[in-house]
Amino acid sequence: SFVFLGSSSGSKLKVPELSINGTQHIVQAGQTLNLTCRGEMVHSWSLPETLSKDSKRLKVIKYACGRNGKQSCSSLTLSRTQASDTGNYSCKYPTSPAKKKKESTVYVFINDTDSPFVEMHSDIPKVIHMTVGREMIIPCRVTAPNIAVTLKKIPRETLIPDGKTIIWDSMKGFRIPKATYKFIGLLSCETTVGGHKYSTKYLTHRETNTIFDVQLSTPRLVKLLKGDSLAINCTVTAAWNTRVQMTWTYPGETKKRGSVTQRIDQKNTEANIFYSILVVDKVRDIDKGQYTCHVKSGPSIKAVNTTVIVYDKMFINLKRRRKTALEAVAGRKSYRLSMKVKAFPSPEVLWLKDGLPAAEKCARYMVKDYSLIIKDVAEEDAGNYTIILSIRQWNLSKNLTVTLTVNVKPQIYENAVSSFPDPNLYLLNSRQVLTCTVYGIPQPKITWMWYPCRQNHFKTRRGFCSYTEGSFILKGGSNIGNRIQSITERTAVIEGKNKTASTIVVAEAKSSGIYSCVASNKVGIAERNISFIVTDVPSGFYISLEKNPIEGENLVLSCSANKFLYKDIAWILPRTVNNQTKAKRSLNKEYSVTLTLTIKNVSLAHSGTYACRARNIYTGKEVLQKKDVTIRAQEAPALLRHLMDQTVNTSNSAMLECQVRGIPEPQISWFKNHEEIQEESG
């Protein structure tokens, strides 16, 4: 039995206790190392990296110990010890990550005079990665604490430990707290034992941790048939002085389903390229899942992954993406016909329109994956579309047909043929027929609206009517504005299209306003506004002359203009007309404005062209109406035919005719026996 030092067997042990007191222990090579650990609970051993726990030379026995057997002990026996067994031997309690480690450690030197260094690298130096400014250890550990070791930089420089920049530690080697460029190169640890010189070599490599890129040779999703082989190449591009560790995680990793090969390409002068290729032969269900390539270089970590799906057999599943009717809108930039497809391997795709290959039928049709994209949707794109999926080598195919409806926004054909003409004039009390020809898919609903005119129309520039008074929906028999005799619709095929003509009959034109034909369907609205101006003036603008006067009489001219179409009415007179002799009078009626010009006591000089000027409210242009006036000169009365003697029987009638001329028209008086005859009854 072993005697434990420094602790009573009855006290509680906060940390396990080793049978060897002190931090280090020396055993001669070939002898047996015996260590015993005692603790309050079950504990475990930690060994040097160079010693495998599976070694046949190693034996660990656990048993109860202490007072009443309430403590736990274990003995470690290592037979036939060798230089490589040198290192830390620790006994520790189990701990959680949050708790502080509780362990006891002893460093054991296995003294071998033929092997003064624990690890020998005499022919091929061991690479030690260094970062400037960070600690670096040259791990030339020795098998006995008193062995003197010299550090040299090949070819000739000796690096002397000074306790600051270079520190010697027999259990670690040479420790350099802050490495500099001075230590880059080939280093050698040397010692002489029994007249023999021994050296172990190390190559320091200044390391960077720059990973430029990590890529997999496969897409994000890999589909395989059971029995196929899977090969995934992970390619890493890193800085020239960067070394990387590449590892894989994948579904069959625990069963070692995959084999990994790695290589490095250093032909590129600007970067190192590392390859790690994972191969899985004859994939099975166990192999489906996520495959991840992990790349690490110091603190730099990157990972890329792909997902592998394994199918039992080839298949094509084809479904409609939407159960609702397929509808596009004419004029849309593009429309995508898309189906739900699940297939393996990827099938050939062919789209037909009305039985013919779609892509050949129209340049606007593009096939992308399992979709057909229609560019600049037009009405003629409506029809039956069929997708055919086929895997020829297995004689497997499926097809699906869908119907596409192309909806068309309502179009009013009268709008296309009229480019904003002047408003139409409708004679007062006349019967009028207005028509609206409409096309659209689905067939539009047509509504007639009435917008009455406002009396302050002169203030609006956009038109003679303002909508602020609201609108009214019209029906046959309506008396809003004007009495509507009827509203009818008829459908006919015009230019190969089903068009609807809606006709509204105005029984009597009495009120001015706007009749609006509104066509609407699910994709839009079209509107045609018909300016309906009721006028009591022929053509809306007219000059009337009471009569051609005789000199000395009055000249009366009237200029009438429709009040909803014209404004700023004025007379333009010949230069011979004197301002003092004329008079103007304006009469504002329901439908028109009349400006009457009266010139009293006219002379022959007043003959000439009289013009009336008005401004069109819509166009802003001035228009003229002209009237040529001739003043007739006075002429003395003259008999055109003398009276003839007549003989008349008693009781018969006699007619005497007096034909005269003169300007102004002469007054005729009749005399009998020089006495004036008065008109009497009988």
Image (cartoon, rainbow, N blue to C red):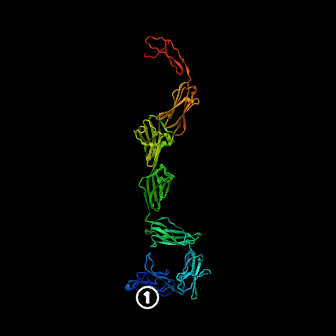
Is residue 496 visible in the rendered structure shown here? no
Give the tally of numbered discs: 1
User: Foreground residue, 337 or 19?
Assistant: 19
- Which residue in the protein does label 1 denote? 3
* Secondary element type, mark 1: loop
Image quarter hosting the N terminus: bottom left
Instruction: Work out whether 291 lies above or below 534.
Output: below
**Residue 263, image x, y percentages:** 54, 72
Q: Position of residue 175 (x, y in %)?
A: 55, 80
Measured along the vertical axis of the image, is residue 449 above or below residue 628?
below
**Front-most of 142 and 531?**
531
Residue found farthest to the right: 156
Q: Nearer the viewer, residue 58 or 431?
A: 431
| Residue 537, x across and y down, in percent | 49, 33
- Give x and y (percent) for residue 20: 46, 86
Would residue 39 be found to the left or right of residue 116 on screen? left
Q: Amino acid at mark 1?
A: Val
